[in-house]
Image (cartoon, coloured by chain):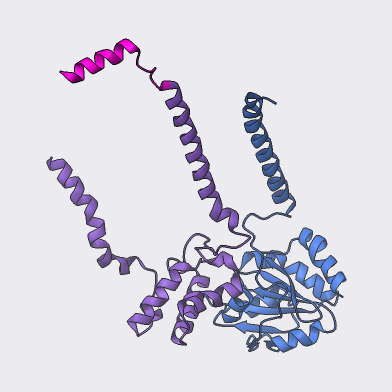
Amino acid sequence: MRALVLALVLLATPAAVSPVVAPAWAVIDPREMLPDPEQEQRARTIGKELRCLVCQNQSIDDSNAGLAQDLRRIVRERVTAGDSNDQVIAFVTDRYGDYVRLTPPFNAATAALWVSPVLVLALGGLAVFGFYRRRQVIDAPAPLTEEERARLARLSAE
Amino acid sequence: MTRRQVMFALPALATLGAAGGFYAMLSGMRSGSFDPRGVPSALIGRSVPGFDLAALPGSNKPGLASRDIIAAAAQRPVLVNFFASWCVPCLVEHPHLMRLAAEGVPVFGINYHSGSQTDPGAVAWLRRHGDPFLRIGIDLTGRVAVDFGVYGVPETYIIDRQGVVRWRMAGPITPEILDEQVRPLLRRLA
């Protein structure tokens, strides 16, 4: 029991501590930050949506690459200029294509990407459904005989 | 065909199909026609982005603006090359740019800076290895590079006579790419 409690406490700790620790993990130089905390927060949200193209699977917010730094600065320029989050993302997508977005939009080129997990899950579901239905048919008990039914009636009457 | 035969054939066909696909990918990677990390540039088919860059100090070459590219491209297709002296692949492709320039192909250079990376050695590098560029712009903030959709150096664009970007190469121009892509395209666009 004590071990369980300890384990739960340990599990909960990172979640409790992370808001305090998070700024230390971020690669963003304080000099890059916007003076307005609300705008800075928006820039962070946008940055998490944009791929650092030279590191491929990191967002520009997580990367120290020069290009990521340039893109962070441009995102902040656009935010300060009054662009909405979508406008900023469109600005970058216009130059780098959909690949720059870590959540790709649904279109003809990405349809297979979005649809395939759903399709595979549906196929798996169908297979499981078919398997159980057939087993039920096989395992269905034989109907009661006349004798058994009479006995059941007698037992339930008691 | 019985149900049993179908169930047997299906996995075999799927495996064969996958094998064919992998073969095509691998042979494409070997010949250079397929790059799994290559992403088409968003700029292909669009006009050169507008910009006006100052000259690279000490290079004795004028700066570069988009109007210079458009004016030169009206005569014959041009190359725009992003480079930096610290970039090793740039040195690999450099002889090919020198050869193209010697053949009279207009080659424009943009000295690439990104993040806090500067390039104080650019002029010395050009002096040492040769300068193929008609004009050289210095992109101190990396902003023009982002407008071009540059990933990193070297990166080269071919612009046709209407000022439209027709081709992009992220990475060094190799002899194969020069012969199979660059030269045929320059001939076609001439």
x 64%, y 62%: residue? B39
Q: How many marks?
A: 0
Does residue B60 show up?
A: no
Q: Residue at x 83, y 75 (%)?
A: B102
Q: Which chain is purple?
A: A
Outermost residue toward the top in this view? A147
Residue A35: percent from left, percent from top: 35, 85
Near-viewer residue (A61 or A48):
A48
Q: To which quarter of the image does residue B187 belong? A: bottom right
Q: Is residue A157 visible?
A: yes
Q: Is B190 situated left or right of A30 in this image?
A: right
In which quadrant will I find the N terminus of chain B?
A: top right
Could you tell me residue A151's position as x and y percent?
25, 13
Q: Which residues are magenta?
A: A139-158
Residue B14 is situated, as x and y percent measured from the top left of the image, at 64, 36
Task: Give me the residue at 20% from left, 48% from top.
Answer: A8
Q: Which chain wears blue?
A: B
Q: Tell which of A67 and A157 is nearer to you.
A: A157
Q: Is residue A73 magenta?
A: no
Q: Is residue B33 above or below residue A2?
A: below
Quick one: quadrant of the C terminus of chain B? bottom right
Q: Is residue B83 left or right of residue A52?
A: right
Residue closest to the far left: A2
Q: Is residue B69 left or right of residue B40?
A: right
Q: Quadrant of residue A37?
A: bottom left
- Across and down, in percent, residue B59 comes to 68, 85
Q: Is residue A156 magenta?
A: yes
Q: Nearer the viewer, residue A124 or A85?
A: A124
The kind of secondary structure the magenta stretch mainly shows is helix
